[in-house]
Amino acid sequence: MPIDLIKAHAYGNDFLFAPIDQTVEAERATLAQRVCDRHTGVGADGLVLYALHEAGATMSLFNADGGVAEVSGNAVRCLAAIVTRARPSVTEVVIETDAGEIPLTLVESAGDRLTFEAMMGQPTGLRQRALEAAGETVEVAELSVGNPQCIVLQGPVDEARLHRLGPVLATHPVFPSGSNVELVEVESSSRIRILIWERGVGPTAASGTGACASAVAAAAFGGASRDVDVVSPGGTQHVTWTEAGMRLTGWAEVVLTGRWHG
């Protein structure tokens, strides 16, 4: 049966969105692998299966390898953009994820590019530890921001190191469900730069939850403030960490609608 697809991205972190009622549960992981393939499918970092409701939408996220992910800050914003395109008068959206509800507020509309502030909740399990990876001892900060994150604050932030450490840390035995990995450089108290290795995907141009986790780790252990710009290859998001939780601000845009006949 053909499936309706929407493609959207936030800072180059791209996702495909399909109505969950058009899919078969037992085939969803395979569907994600097929549609996300950049040569034989449509191409994306993940597949989101969603259902609209009065306050917003529910979503389930599959990474490009077919693995289930709890939440994505960028996918949440993309889905909020889909909701507000369908309901132009709406400025407050709630997206229900496997990691809980995320409320979003539309703060700017510039053509197809919609900027949202998302309340991402409080980080949990924040701690530092040393891990053996790729033949070296790496000091990392680990935490959850709805999904597992491993932050490397020390050492160079470059593509070669990302490709050396990323796949090893993402599948390290201390993370039974795998982990997202970020290399982080604190450039100033209000600005950090990151590179991302996404669990089940590999390098990505941006990550909303990765930006949140990197900002928290940089504030806790790297001398950054709790209000920072987070610069990744795809662009700059903003994270504020307060007693109320993490606020993630950035844009998303819908780029394609179509049908999958595969």
Image (cartoon, helix red, strand yellow):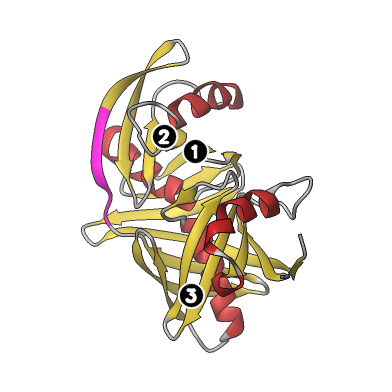
Image location (x, y in percent) of residue 9: 62, 59
Name the amino acid, label 1.
Answer: Arg
Image location (x, y in percent) of residue 236: 54, 50
Q: Residues within 10 Å of mark 1 (few under 14, many from 20)?
A: many
Q: Residue at x 26, y 55 (%)?
A: 122
Per the image, the residue denoted by label 1 is 193
Of pointers 3 and 1, the one earlier in the residue sequence: 3
Image location (x, y in percent) of residue 8: 64, 63
- Residues at marks 3 and 2, CA–CA distance in whole angstroms: 29 Å
Residue 126 lies in the magenta-colored region: yes
Q: Which mark is residue 106?
A: 3
SS at mark 2 in the image = strand
Q: Residue at x 36, y 26 (%)?
A: 173
Q: Which mark is residue 252?
A: none
242 sits left or right of 152 in the view = left
Would you say the magenta stretch is mainly helix, strand or loop? strand
Q: Relative to 36, is 8 above or below? A: below
